[in-house]
Image: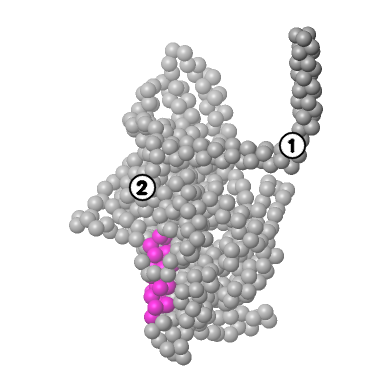
Amino acid sequence: MLRTQTARLFSTSARAFNAAGANAAKKPTVSPIKRTFKFVAGATLLSTVGALAYVGYKIQREAFPAKQDTQVATFADGRKKKTLVILGSGWGSIPLLKNLDTSLYNVVIVSPRNYFLFTPLLPSVPTGTVDVRSIIEPVRSITRRCAAEVIYLEAECTDIDPVNNKLTIRQATTVHSGHSATDSGSTKSTLSEEIVTSLNYDYLVVGVGAQPSTFGIPGVAEHSTFLKEISDSTKIRRSLMDIIEAANILPKDDPERKRLLSIVVCGGGPTGVETAGELQDYIDQDLKQWMPEVANELKVTLVEAQPHVLNMFNDKLVQYTQQVFQDTNIDLRTSTMIKRVDDKKVYAEHKESNGTTSMSEIPYGMLIWATGNAQRPIVRDLISKVEEQKNARRGLLVNDHLLLDGSNNIFALGDCTFTKYAPTAQVAFQQGQFLAQHFKRLNEIESVKYKIQSPGPQDNVERLSKKLVKLETSLEPFKYNHQGSLAYIGSERAVADLVWGDWSNVSTGGTFTYLFWRSAYIYMCLSVKNQILICFDWAKLSLFGRDISKE
């Protein structure tokens, strides 16, 4: 009896085991698509977590900079620590500062503008595509993240004494861009007494940029709005809303209403093209929704003296830009040179393809001047003091190391110089990077010279002399690496002329290029804060559109 029950138990267990094995064998396998989906989901999650961690780390570093070494008169070996003064806070000076080993010099930066302005997105500010605070980076947040202490002075340099290595500076704040007929773009502060002082330097870097040029055209300085500074974009915004609201009061058949609703942009370079594109976007995407009675009459006209806009771009991209302008109702007038301007009209000369010319009048409610560079007064003054600069007409003359002709300790970079390169932000940026490395090598040379003059017990003067010769002869000249050009042309389209080395050029335009344009400008921002703020601005634009209020 017991034996029979035991046999049945084992028989039942065997059947259960076999059934379990059979069920396991019948278990369905995971499909390749499902496995791929799981892998992609896991990789995406991991990448997202990693990206957020990296961004958080960058934000932490920017928000809580490390402790800096204070400025001292001498190095540990007794050698004098030289004073390096940088004039300006633009595309040349700030990259120099960010890449410079500030522990090698006592660095002082002097500029009436206490922030770095990301100018490629400045045309997006008047229409509200990007907020003004999103494209500025305080100078002090940059200096605070340097290796050693950097002194910033909110002032304008009013005089350079190249003989005695001395500067005269005046406390000033930038409020407008100025132009070639008047000033350098800064004004007195709100203090009751003017503060003027002097500053000595061992090395000086002039990176004050340029101011808009009116080309001596009568009426431009008095009646146009420039696009060079933040204050200009604010002025354009207010003027734009003023003319719209004023025109809205007038009857539709009133000629004054038509004039007020005419916006003229002068300049067919990237700034002018992007400004015209942004204005037309504002009209088509926002004003037509909220103010259709006025928006349908608004007209944007772009005037360019050359036969084509964006002359530095590939011909196909130029033709594409002109076609986009035609499709979006931007009135493009090329080969049209402005001769004079009054408070209501632009008087221009148009050159036909056969060489004949004719005069035309363009009524306007707002004129935006987005072309031409002129020397600032401080640059003209420096040119007059250096004999080798007497023939400089368009900017400071420098050698291959960006050293001012006629000087052994003054360097210059960016738009205030005249070189074989175009006056662009890309050129100034690379010049700043170059000078940062150049000053590092100059410090090495000074260190070796000091050891030769005051050798220590372990110093071999002969070996140091050979090292000095090697260092002096190995100073590399500045070499510009053109990486291409980008421009937004409106209607969420952009053009790009990209260069990879000496062997590949890519010219493209369209919506995909517009996404690349956005990505490139985000990458070019100097801080994570600016990158995040600009992305938020674009996200707000997609959700809510642009604001139509004046303030």
Q: Is residue 251 above or below residue 473?
A: below
Residue 415, x across and y down, in percent:
49, 55
* Residue 407 in view of the camera: no
Tell me the residue at 76%/23% (across/down): 16
Q: Is residue 114 above or below residue 16?
A: below
Tell me the residue at 52%/67% (across/down): 278
Numbered mark located on residue 506 in the image: none
Q: Main secondary structure of the magenta part?
A: helix
Residue 195, x across and y down, in percent:
24, 52
Residue nearest the viewer, comparing 342 with 260: 260
Q: Which residues are magenta?
A: 220-246
Q: Quadrant of residue 241?
A: bottom left
Tell me the residue at 40%/55% (across/down): 133
Please name the residue that numbered disc 1 is placed on: 30
Q: Quadrant of residue 86?
A: top left
Farthest residue to the left: give it: 192
- In terms of sequence position, does the residue under pointer 1 or pointer 2 come before the other? 1
Please name the amino acid that badge 1 sits on. Val
Residue nearest the viewer, comparing 216 with 507: 507
68 displayed left or right of 367: left
Numbered mark located on residue 110 in the image: 2
